[in-house]
Image: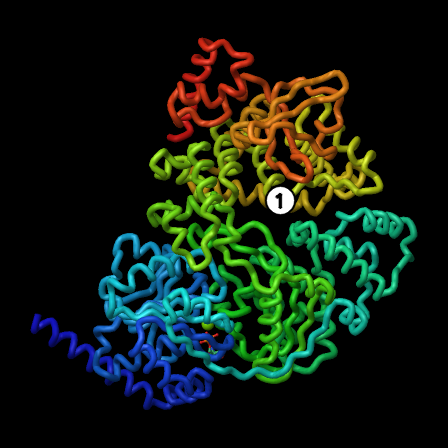
Amino acid sequence: VVVKEKILQRRSLQLRHRQQDWQESPEGQKLLEFRRSLPAFKAKDAFLRVISDNQVVVVSGETGCGKTTQLPQYILESEIGAARGAECNIICTQPRRISAMSVSERVAAERGEKLGESVGYKVRLEGMKGRDTRLLFCTTGVLLRRLLVDRSLRGVTHVIVDEIHERGMNEDFLLIVLKELLPRRPDLRLILMSATLNAELFSSYFNGAPTMHIPGFTFPVREHYLEDILQRTGYRLTAYNQIDDYGQEKTWKMQKQAQAFRKRKSQIASAVEDALEVADFNMYSLRTQDSLSCWSPDSIGFNLIEHVLCHIVKNERPGAVLVFMTGWDDINSLKDQLQAHPLLGDQRQVLLLACHGSMASSEQRLIFENPEGGVRKIVLATNMAETSITINDVVFVVDTGKAKETSYDALNNTPCLLPSWISKAAARQRRGRAGRVQPGECYHLYPRCVYDAFADYQLPELLRTPLQSLCLQIKTLQLGSISEFLSRALQPPEPLSVQNAIEYLKIIGALDENENLTVLGHKLALLPVEPKLGKMLILGTIFKCLDPIMTVVAGLSVRDPFVVPSDKKDLAESAKAKFAARDYSDHLALIRAYEGWKDAEAKQAGYEYCWRNFLSSQTLKVIDSLRKQFFYLLKDIGLVNNNSETYNTWSHEEHLLRAVICAGLFPGISSVVNKDKSIALKTMEDGQVLLYASSVNGVVPRIPYPWLVFNEKVKVNSVFLRDSTGISDSVLLLFGGNVSRGGLDGHLKMLGGYLEFFMKPELAKTYLSLKMEMEELIQK
Ligand code: ADP
Ligand code: MG
């Protein structure tokens, strides 16, 4: 023990000398000077005092004031200064890999070191950390997994949880675990850092922990909304352009306009009218909440963004431009488009950079540098540039108003699927990025009335993620009993809904009776879609009909590509019915429509095809790109290999498709009784139900199947089924539900409500033992 202490002491002294040497060197002094100019520096002493006196502290401060790079460093320096450097062990979590990496690099540089000396980082599958690393930046997921094997974080002296205002699911999980740990580790210090002023919520969660605010400085930023931008920049959103720009063929009005436009190419509405039109559409999408699937990489708003960037480069004062996009794919496509532009693609005038989670670190460094010789820097970034990364010389911000909402990002590193509107808080944050060094300008590419309709704050991810997926995540992270764990959250979800979700996961075979993950459950947790859709995908691989099943799953996780304009209902319905001739299935209709579109696309006739068949090409494009993502994901978790043909041997077997759809959508089942002039539908829970007319089965005189499976029901006055597929008795018996739940007899009893009518018990037993075999196969 004595020897060990001696060694520690010696190392601590060495660290102290090295730090002093660096701070006295010319280069070190220059950086120190910069660091002292940050607002955080004024708060340094107060900060160190408050953490020595309290176990938990909540710090808030304007983005860029120095929370992430400075506060952990102050702790490290003060420990080193007190010759305790070798004993401290500081962990600072970041919601994203990229910030963990870039911040650690920056802090190491400020300390005149290479990464992996006293400062390191660790993200999933990657890291830079040495024996002497005392300050570690890691993703929240990494710390959560460490807690799995080391419940009391032995040896750790400080935990800093950064960006808590984002309310990511992992951060909320981590806080639950840490709250429980604190009484057992009275020497451990916990520091929570937030970019917004909602410190009270966190403070009261930790029994009134002290809060501290670091005042920042920013310059005023002028705001421009779409109507104003169109006027200022002289951009004309023609009817045709609107479709290009926003993928808005969704509204019938737009379609008519586009049609007219194509006939009389000269028809151009005035800019203001156009803006109102856009506003109208945007309001429509906000109301129907399916706004954003129109943000596909190949079209949306790119022309408008290009135009605004041109305007800035040509007419505005010097200063970098920051464009907020939704993700890696649209950043890349926009970059391609801009690079082909005569002005924006000219490297002597414009430096185009991308800033997103998977960029190379050489590219990362360029983002922070000032280009030489009057070159204009344009950075295309995801919402990580809202708070986690600060680019100082930004004067112009272009805000598209959209962001991808993560579902279970950090844990599996899987892409999140759909973009959506940001909150007012996020829009304010984006705007603020323009005023770091001088007064700035912010271009919001949406009308003011759309901003007014934004939510004030984004809902915490924990309350946004579907509960079934959430439960699977808790189990994957081995956080114990689901309901008990969730009841301790900062803002817990409804207990009854949690119970229902657990029960549902048992029914579909993702959890066993003791709430443990089954093999199927493990796989489902790795797929970023609802469990029922994930199960369909997995069955699609097992039963070798993957392509059509991927189409169905993509369609169900986005929205219906069939468009039903209110003034052309009948035409639209009959167009859809053509795809389902004699099939009695919306899901099969979707498969056919998609396949027809693919063929038409290959002949450059995709647009006409959509037009004729009342389909949204935008939605079909999203479905197309989702299908690709699904295949990669399935490959990633080892369920398929490269050769997709292997998984499509039976893709044309319509009965098999019905069966797999049934397996996924069960217990969404309704019985069918054909009467003289009507069809009576019933579900177990609701009794009588009705079908929407937009379902192909909603407009037929009779349905020659005893059962319908459906994905979604909606309660208005009566309960309505949105979509449906007819299935036979034997399909329901073989594919509905999960035998392992309650064994053969139990299962028979459960299906009994449905099946007594038509099955001889002996026959049922044979079916069920077949089914049992099949389920074993699936669980393997
Ligand atoms: P906060 O966490 O409060 O948002 P940071 O600690 O991330 O602030 O950043 C503080 C300042 O340090 C920023 O204003 C920025 O100027 C500077 N900075 C951060 N990272 C880098 C970097 N990689 N290169 C150059 N400057 C940086
Ligand atoms: Mg920060």
Residue 476 is left or right of residue 437, and the answer is left
> Is residue 773 among the parts visible in the rendering?
no
> Is residue 18 among the parts visible in the rendering?
yes
Q: Which residue is mark 1?
A: 558
Residue 534 is left or right of residue 155, and the answer is right
Residue found at x 26% / y 84%? 81
Q: Is mark 1 within 8 Å of ligand 2?
A: no
Above or below, comparing residue 761 to residue 144 in the picture:
above
Position in image of residue 751 (x %, y %): 49, 21
Above or below, comparing residue 115 to residue 554 in the picture:
below
Position in image of residue 323 (x %, y %): 62, 68
Above or below, comparing residue 722 to residue 226 in the picture:
above
The one of 200 and 401 positioned closer to us in this rendering:
200
Where residue 182 sits, quadrant-wise, is: bottom left
The amino acid sitting under disc 1 is Val
Position in image of residue 669 (x %, y %): 57, 27
The one of 514 and 768 positioned closer to us in this rendering:
514
Label 1: state its secondary structure: loop
- Estimate how packed mark 1 is, as few (under 14), some (14 to 19) or many (20 or more) residues with alpha carbons within 10 Å: some
Residue found at x 50% / y 73%? 197
